[in-house]
Image: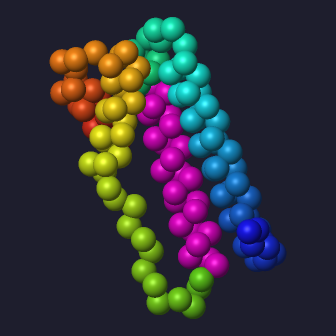
Amino acid sequence: MNVPAPSTNLPLWREYRRAFEEFARKARIVQSLKESAGPARALIDDALLELERARLHYNNCRDALAAALRPNSNLAPVASGDHVGHIRELARLLWDFENRRDGRADDDWYRAEKIV
């Protein structure tokens, strides 16, 4: 379902759309690295860091647009803070990048924490 973009919120809609497209582009880069044969560890970390930055920017744009669409609401913004769950997801992705080698859980976890 598409919600029409009121003219007063047009800049927010545009920024939201740009943020989504950038996040999707960064996700495609990470996916292509995952599918490639043995990408360099630094390249993986850089791509995941860029993906995380794009995700945060997208979330901020989404929240700003949502707030603008409900200006008279008494609802508080939803906290975006399950950092442990997000770290776990990134650590698992790093483990996948390393061909699921055993004995690397702590290293993958600390790399994921550093990225988040």
Residue 31: percent from left, percent from top: 56, 27
Report the front residue among 87 and 65: 87
* Residue 43 position within the rendered picture, expressed as x and y whole percent measured from the top left: 47, 18
- The magenta segment is 46-69
Quarter the N terminus occupies = bottom right
* Picture layout, residue 88 above or below residue 67: above
Residue name at image x 53 percent, y 51 percent: 57
Q: Quadrant of the C terminus?
A: top left
Question: Residue 46, how many percent across, how many down?
Answer: 45, 25
Nearer-the-camera pick, 58 or 94: 94
Residue 67 drawn above or below residue 113: below
Q: Classify residue 44 by image quadrant.
A: top left
Left or right of 14, for residue 28 = left
Dominant secondary structure of the residues highlighted in magenta in the image: helix
Q: Residue at x 34, y 59 (%)?
A: 81
Tell me what residue is drawn at x 68 percent, y 45 percent: 21
On whether residue 65 falls in the magenta region, the answer is yes
